[in-house]
Amino acid sequence: MTQPQIEIQLIAMVVAIACAIPGVFLVLRKMALISDAISHSILPGIVIGFFITQDLNSPLLIALAAVTGVITVVLVEWIQKTGLVKEDTAIGLVFPALFSIGVILIAKNANDVHLDVDAVLLGELAFAPFDRLLMSGMDMGPKSLWIMGVILLVSLLLLLLFYKELKVSTFDVGLSAAMGISPMVMHYGLMSVSSVTVVGAFDAVGAILVVALMITPAATAYLLTSNLKKMLLISVGIGIFSAIGGYWLAHLLDASISGSMTTVLAVVFLMVYLFAPGKGLIAVLYRQRQQRTEVSLITFLLHLNNHSEENERHINHLQEHINWQKVRSKTVLNLAERNNMITIDNDVVSLTKKGKDFTDLALEYIITNKDEKIEHMKEDFFLFRG
Amino acid sequence: MSITDYFEQLFSDYTLRTITLGTAVLGAICGMLGSFAVLRKQSLLGDAISHAALPGIAIAFLITGAKDSNVLLLGALVSGLIGTFWIRGIITKTHLKTDTALGLILSLFFGFGMLLLTFIQKQPNANQAGLDKYLFGQAATLVVSDVIVMVIVTGVSLFTLLLFWKEFKILLFDADYTKTLGFNTRIIDILITFFIVLAIVIGLQTVGVVLMSAMLLAPAAAARQWTNSLSVMIGLAAIFGAFSGVFGTAISASQDNLSTGPVIVLVAAVFVLVSFIFSPGRGLLFREIRFRQNRRDLKLKKTLQLMYRIASTHENISHPHSIKILNDFQGFTRGTLKTMEEREWIEIEQKSWMLTSKGYREASNLFSKSTTDDTATD
């Protein structure tokens, strides 16, 4: 590996980690699309900042653009508060308008501005190592590494300092207000950190891929755990993996690094979406199937419980009476027999002692339908496990 | 070229006419179908789908190697539909919320599309230039065949809309009721979503991936402010959309260096802003006016209540009292007394007032509301 290669991977990693941290909270607060809105609407802020500073990496420009990000949030909330349109429409109205202003500003000043909409939207990580930070003639490494490093450090510091407050205000706004932690301060604090991160990251990975780096690691981690600390750690891990994996994929295909990073993220998400234990697609479909079978089982047992006459309990009769398809009734019958809940005698089905007890419990559940009554049943009952 | 020049040349200049017609038709269909997106709370679906269409365009190019915009749009349609159904799968099958699902599909598909586009650009094939017009859109590249496609799509969706009007409308406002009536909600739902995706895809070439969502939303959000009727809203949205298209094209054609897409979006945003402020029913301006009127009315009634309490201590309710005894109460001015006199609640003689029988009735009914009160309409 050459030095620029190492530096590119280092920048990609720092960007990924810096994005993953606020991303977790955005996903948990159901504000994932705010990151999309911010990443587009900072464009006019960047352009105006660039007019003033003539330097894409100047701290003033980052501050100006971050202010535009916060203004976006305020505007969206203001429109929501008027109640004229739904919440999501407010987001969808604000950011394209601001983005259009940015595009027009660039187009009108195309001759004086060394700034390209493509570059803002898509970014180019490969050029990042060539913009070096020089301090009294000494080469201190790539500029964007320093900028993102500082942003990452600050957001890590804020996370450690306000972890408890963030946690409470994310999961229970009412409680946090009662405890004297202002949800407003937390909200705008998070919005400011997100804006700064988006601005800092945009010129490395581009405005749209910032969204991917923010949301995807967090959403993937959310499918794997419901513990906030683990979620933060997993999403940071996924971010790092996508940074390094993405770099080498881009190297292989000779394509854009940020696009490759997103593609790696997409593959990781797809895998987790399909195979995550408990919350993945396959697990959910399996559970839904199980639950369907168990509902059938209970229906079947209740039917047996209600009828003492033999013809109602005849094995051939069940099919037409409960109106199940053949396969289904066979599955249910087998399941019940395996669990010793029924005995089949001369093609007539009857409940065993265990089956009778189980049916009574189920009946009690259906009648009372109160959580504390069925607490002990959750152990033996797949269905009630949620 | 100034704007008046533009309108003069509109009928003679072939390119200008094509582009204007294209953006107008596009605005109309987006407004029409966008109304459904807005009312179904799927506003940001448009944003997600337009981004998700990008890999489809790239893959269609990789397979066919052609730049025929219809083939590319077919790819966009397929990939947009995959994105839509994946979003639905994420929302229904996992505990991730709508916003996360939209953000995921939007950014992941777009990123993959970018990977493919940059990959294509490195290919030794001179044909690939121009694919990135789908990023920001270039109305200038519209040709007659594109406009014909747009018109056909508009016609088909209008026809379907009229054919299934009842079903669309009922699903929009009460999905559960629709189900109990025995309609197949799934199919109606897929039909609407399909047409929304279609509208987005045909707009990509003109306004581009990033701004497409605004094309869909803005006319509908503006139209929503003026009416509570679905058919009127759809009609208005189509008109607003078409006008944004025409004005946007006019403005961008009359200046150098102005791309059409952003200007159309900004014109649509102006429509939204004007509607937000000036619509008579819901607009902010009239709402504020009503609010103030109500507040003044309330103050008036507060004064009336005080007078009522004073008057009810006397046997004759129209016994005159001096205005001075109202002094320790802050809620009256010469103006309010005059208004009360106009409403015939009181009569004023020199420096004293007396309650009329109408005013007495009004005041005694203030809390009980036993008679209908025509002043309190809100």
Image (cartoon, coloured by chain):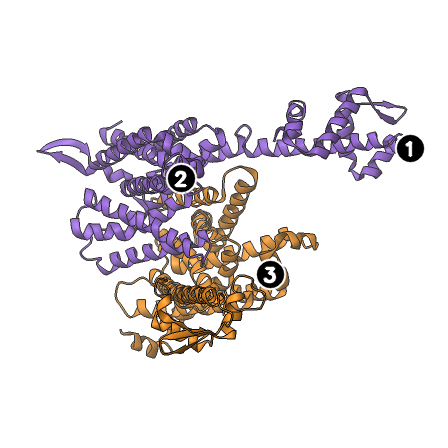
Chain colours: A purple, B orange
Q: Which residue is mark 2?
A: A26
Mark 3 highlights which residue? B169
Same chain letter for marks 2 and 1 = yes
Cβ–Cβ under 8 Å for marks 2 and 1: no
Image location (x, y in percent) of residue B33 = 51, 61
User: Which residue, given by chain and number where applicable, does mark 1 sit on?
Assistant: A311
Quarter of the image for the N terminus of chain A: give it. Answer: top left
Number of residues whose C-alpha sits closer than 10 Å to that of mark 1, classed few (under 14), some (14–19) or many (20 or more): few
Across and down, in percent, residue B174 comes to: 61, 55
* Above or below B356: residue B184: above
Front-most of B224 and B108?
B224
Asked if marks 3 and 1 touch (Cβ < 8 Å), the reply is no
Q: Nearer the viewer, residue B75 or A213?
A: A213
Q: In this rendering, does residue B134 appear at all?
A: no
Where disc 1 sits, the SS reads: helix
Closer-to-camera residue (A68/A274): A68
Q: Amino acid at mark 2?
A: Leu
* Residue B336 position within the rendered picture, expressed as x and y whole percent measured from the top left: 38, 71
Instruction: Identify the residue at image location x=79%, y=24%.
Output: A356
